[in-house]
Image (cartoon, rainbow, N blue to C red):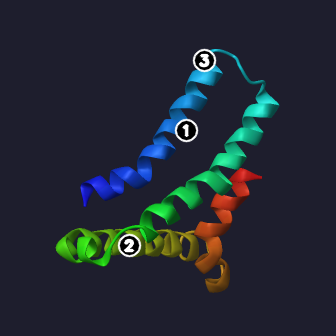
């Protein structure tokens, strides 16, 4: 299962590493790096994660059910934490609080 997760995340890590090296060598200007960051975060990362998830066979997932359950609990738990923090301390409406984690991540990219 670890190889499956690493196989899905390795292209993302390599892309970030290439971006770091290109910035260190001053191959891009500030405006170009912003465009590259948007492209990677809006297209390459979701496509890479989707491809890694879809290519995982069911028998591999069923072998490590504790990992799958832990990942589901972590995703739902983090969503719940952000929802509760958005709703109660910040006083947002329930409809906005339910969309706040997604809206804030998109807002940072624009």
Q: Which quadrant holds residue 23?
A: top right
Of residues 65 and 60, which is closer to you in this image?
Answer: 60
* Secondary element at image label 2: helix
Closer to the observer: label 3 or label 2?
A: 3
Pointer 1 with pointer 2, Cβ within 8 A: no
Where residue 8 sits in the image (x, y, percent)?
Answer: 42, 55
* Secondary element at image label 3: helix
Q: Earlier in the sequence, mark 3 or mark 2?
A: 3
* Quarter the N terminus occupies: bottom left
Q: Please name the residue that numbered disc 2 is placed on.
A: 77
Q: Residues within 10 Å of mark 3 (few under 14, many from 20)?
A: few
Q: Please name the residue that numbered disc 3 is placed on.
A: 24
Q: State the separation of the CA atoms marked 1 and 3.
A: 14 Å
Of residues 100 and 11, which is closer to you in this image?
Answer: 11
* Secondary element at image label 1: helix
Q: Please name the residue that numbered disc 1 is placed on.
A: 15
Closer to the observer: label 1 or label 2?
A: 1
Q: State the separation of the CA atoms marked 3 and 2.
A: 37 Å
For image coordinates 47% across by 40% down, the residue present is 13
Q: Residues within 10 Å of mark 2 (few under 14, many from 20)?
A: few
Closer to the observer: label 1 or label 3?
A: 1
């Amino acid at each position: 299962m670890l190889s499956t997760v690493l196989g899905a995340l390795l292209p993302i890590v390599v892309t970030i590493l290439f971006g770091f090296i290109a910035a260190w060598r001053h191959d891009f200007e500030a405006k170009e790096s912003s465009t590259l960051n948007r492209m990677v975060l809006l297209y390459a990362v979701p496509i890479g994660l989707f491809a890694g998830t879809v290519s995982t066979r069911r028998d591999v997932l069923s072998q490590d059910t504790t990992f799958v359950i832990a990942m589901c609990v972590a995703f739902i738990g983090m969503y719940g934490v952000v929802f509760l923090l958005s709703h109660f301390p910040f006083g947002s409406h329930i409809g906005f609080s339910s969309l706040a984690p997604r809206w804030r991540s998109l807002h940072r990219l624009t």
